[in-house]
Amino acid sequence: MGNTHTEIRTHIRLWDSLIHGSTHGALHHWDGDRYARTTWREVVADAHGMAATLRAAGVRPGTRVATVLTNSADCVRGLLAVWLAGGAVASLPLPSRGQTLGEYGRMLESLTARLDPTLVLVDAQLEPLVPEGLRADLPVLSWSALHGPGRIDPSPPGLDDVAYIQYSSGSTGGAKGCTLTPRAIAAQLGLILDMTGGRPGAEVIASWMPLSHDMGVFGLMLYSWAFDYDFVLSTPERFGMAPRSWFRDMAEFGATMTGGTTTALYLASRAQGRSALPRELALRVCVVGAERVDAEVLAGVSDTFAASGLSPSAFMPAYGMAEATLAVSATGWADAPRVRGFDASALIEGKIVDLADDDPGAVRLVSNGAPLPGVGVTMEHPEEVSQLLVTSPSLATGYHADPERTAERFRDGVLRTGDHGFVRDGEVYFVGRADDLVSVGGRNVYTSEIEAAVEALGPVRKGCSALVDVAGTGAGVAGAGPSELVLLLEPARKSDDFELIADRAAELAREKSGIALSECVFVERGCLPRTPSGKIQRFRCRSMLTGDMSRLKIISRVRLG
């Protein structure tokens, strides 16, 4: 299979793979109360008609179209339609949890001002989110309004033209647009075929991940389309309301591949409980990424679904980022995840010291696997925990309209990721993002270490804590003292003893990193700001703490001595 994949990866052309007209694979999309089926041939035919409408609206080679991609069938069709008309798709972030209408509108205005797009495309139900000022400057159309009988001669972007601008949801800062070419996207689809052991025409892929996220659009949807798989497309909203729907859909459709985050796996497992799935799982690949992978969660999910046929080897911890289109490294598709113990204190100081898994001073890291074929991963400082440097055939060409940041991160074909980690025995270990490394009192702290330890206590909801550094509050006045560490928490129960939880959290922080928490802030369930894929937006937590705290819906504040 490896030689076949290499040949496919070498010769794949994005447009050929998407408009090949196959009748085998189909899109199964959730339309509110059931799944509807549309063959890829029908999707392509509809896209041609939509492209004619776009051409009449001014979309042609070299233009950009600002879009808000949701998990609707018309959005899937419209993505190809923009390309057929010659435009580049600029995928703007969806509204984040906790973001006000005004904040989202201002973000749309700021991003579109830099894009200079021909028009804006959104789902009809999202049109009210587009501010009046933007409507006055640009045509705003719904995806469904593009349907029509017309036809044009397709003129999609060339191999090295900009075809896609992927704006991040901003988990650690403002949104930035990664510019991707058809060559880079096609290379990534070939890499995913290799890493998953995919069988063209013979897989079923299920997803709830938002199409505004790189894993949702490239790793699951376009990958399915390009290699003629059946694609079962749910929505983030449905998953949020009923996390158990993810694995139930996979059982129902016989899905062989999916992808998601550690937090999402935990939620699905907890929601499933002890009940059985309607059918046995056929799942052989579950790509786990977008955040640091938790070994305990993988073990728990394996236990929950073992009776339904889930094998631990189905989990594929991976490392990737939008700047590389998506995937950079991954565990072998037939291999169980690899977990190793390292000295937690040494890692914070940049040293890589092996320890036994059960050593009290060990942190258990899940390997993100070996770099994919043709991809290189090195460390900025060899033999130390340091910034990961990546070379890949699917690298972005930079950030749209941001030459300063492009020059900082993209140098001579090498991406400076901003992520801290190391390579051991040919495998990548992700430790934390540079923005998640804070320094307090001369000590470095990886926020994820303390958050994971606190959540393991039990009284805190999984994936619902955020450690942030803020200017010292002194006598309650921001900026009156040195930097402090504040832990925001969503408690499992309002009846719990918050002072006891805060004391235990402070003790864990001292044990793990030798630092002192200044305060624990307990907030209502669902108040911590998140991206649409579920990652907590630490920078927005920080701004809320130092600005409009009313939006956090605080239950209790516990100052720590």
Image (cartoon, rainbow, N blue to C red):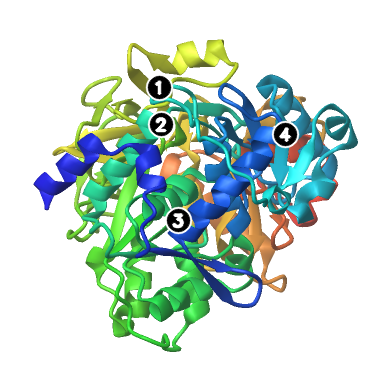
Mark 1 = which residue?
160
User: Could you say whether the residue bearing mark 4 is in a helix, strand or loop?
Assistant: loop
Give the side of residue 529 with respect to residue 349, left or right: right
Q: What residue type is labelled 1?
A: Asp
Between the residue at mark 4 and the residue at mark 2, the CA separation in whole angstroms equals 23 Å
The reply to whether residue 372 is in sight is no
Q: Which amino acid does label 3 sit on?
A: Thr
Q: To which quarter of the image does residue 13 belong?
A: top left
Label 2 or label 3, whichever lies nearer to me, is: 2
Label 4 or label 2, whichever lies nearer to me, is: 4
Between the residue at mark 2 and the residue at mark 3, the CA separation in whole angstroms equals 27 Å
Label 1 or label 4, whichever lies nearer to me, is: 4
Q: Where is residue 482 in the image (x, y as percent from the top left)?
A: 66, 25
Mark 4 = which residue?
57
Q: What residue type is labelled 4?
A: Ala
Mark 3 = which residue?
261
Residue 419's label in the rendered image is none
Q: To which quarter of the image does residue 391 belong?
A: top left
Labels 2 and 3 touching (C-beta < 8 A):
no
Labels 1 and 3 touching (C-beta < 8 A):
no
Task: Identify the residue shown where x is 28% and y is 39%.
Answer: 12
Task: Identify the residue shown where x is 42% and y is 54%.
Answer: 220
Labels 1 and 4 touching (C-beta < 8 A):
no
Mark 2 = which residue?
182
Which of the pair 279/438 is nearer the observer?
279
Q: Which of marks 1 and 4 is nearer the N terminus?
A: 4
